[in-house]
Image (cartoon, grey):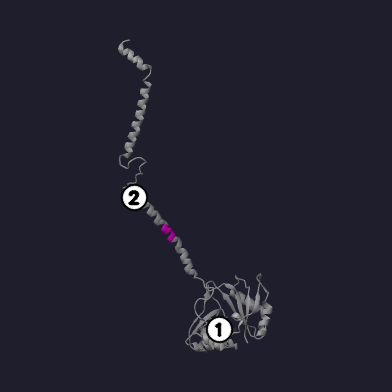
Amino acid sequence: MPTTVYVEGLPFDMAPRDAETELRTRLAGIPDGGVLGVRLATWHDSGRLRGYAHVDVGSSEAAAEAVRKLDKAEVRGRYLTATAAKERGGKPSAPPEEDDASRVSKRIFCKNVPYDATPEALRDLFGSFGVVDDVRIPTQDGKAKGMAYVDFASDKSALKAVRAARAGDGSVALDGRKLVLDYDEGGPRAGFHRDRSLAQAAKTLQPTSDHARRGEKKQSAGRTSAGDSGSGSGSRPPKRGLVATPNSSRQATRERKQSKDQQREGGKRARGRGAPMETSRCLVHGV
């Protein structure tokens, strides 16, 4: 019976294709058909590894051998941890028929798809189970990600395909690689991130909006300054203590001149109170 081995500790900067090749190379020669499939967990937005994977093998004996080869193995400075995969809570998995009846859908998710596979090849493969409405192969930077989505016309056709893949008889294989099928339940999976193009667009627009806000503040300050200056003739604001009239500057100049003249006249009078005044009085009276 097919069994799954859970592997964690894969380098995050490792390409998915290189990680799958590494696992298959290390597990070469295990019994009962070797590796049936490798399911690598990746982030949906970037396609980068999340550090763990599920490896499908043909039997429990093959799983034990895979754990022995992978556990504590070093890959690019990191050490792997391999264990036999279990259902959540440690409960055994339900029979395929019962599980299929509760999760069946027209769309299936295909893993372990050859990277050079075409939609036409997948359509021909799954056409033996029923009418295929659509086939989509996700790509990253123009390269296939090793997975695909297949939409059937009826859920019965999807059920047949999933059961055939789980039987492990080799009827669901492409270019010598056995496909791993499961129902696509829809909705974003764990690790779903916001689309980078939207985030980049938001960052691009942000400086423009900030610049516009700064421009509005400058315009508002300019309008306020123009309103305070009166008619907007460009003249300087009046000095403290002076009235803002057209002749205020000339009046201030005259006042300053008069003040200086008064001070100068006062000085002359102070100097004329001494001996010259007595002399002048004597001459007047003829003494």
Q: Residue at x 33, y 39 (%)?
A: 249
* Residue 276 lies in the magenta-colored region: no
Q: Position of residue 150 (x, y in %)?
A: 51, 83
Q: Residue at x 49, y 87 (%)?
A: 155
Q: Is residue 263 visible?
A: yes
Residue 165 or 277: which is nearer the viewer?
277
Q: Position of residue 39 (x, y in %)?
A: 59, 79
Residue 282 or 21: which is nearer the viewer?
282
Q: Which residue is mark 2?
A: 227
Q: Quadrant of residue 111?
A: bottom right
What segment is highlighted magenta in the picture?
209-213
Could you tell me which quadrant the C terminus lies in? Answer: top left
Q: Chief secondary structure of the magenta span?
A: helix
Q: Quadrant of residue 175?
A: bottom right
Question: Does residue 180 appear left or right of residue 61 in this picture?
Answer: left
Q: Which numbered disc flags the more N-terminal residue, 1 or 2?
A: 1
Q: Which residue is mark 1?
A: 181
Question: Does residue 174 appear left or right of residue 72 in this picture?
Answer: left
Q: Is residue 28 visible?
A: no
Residue placed furthest toward the top: 287
Is 249 drawn above or below residue 156 in the view shown? above
Alpha carbons under labels 1 and 2: distance apart: 74 Å
Question: Does residue 168 appear left or right of residue 285 in this picture?
Answer: right
Q: Nearer the viewer, mark 1 or mark 2?
A: 2
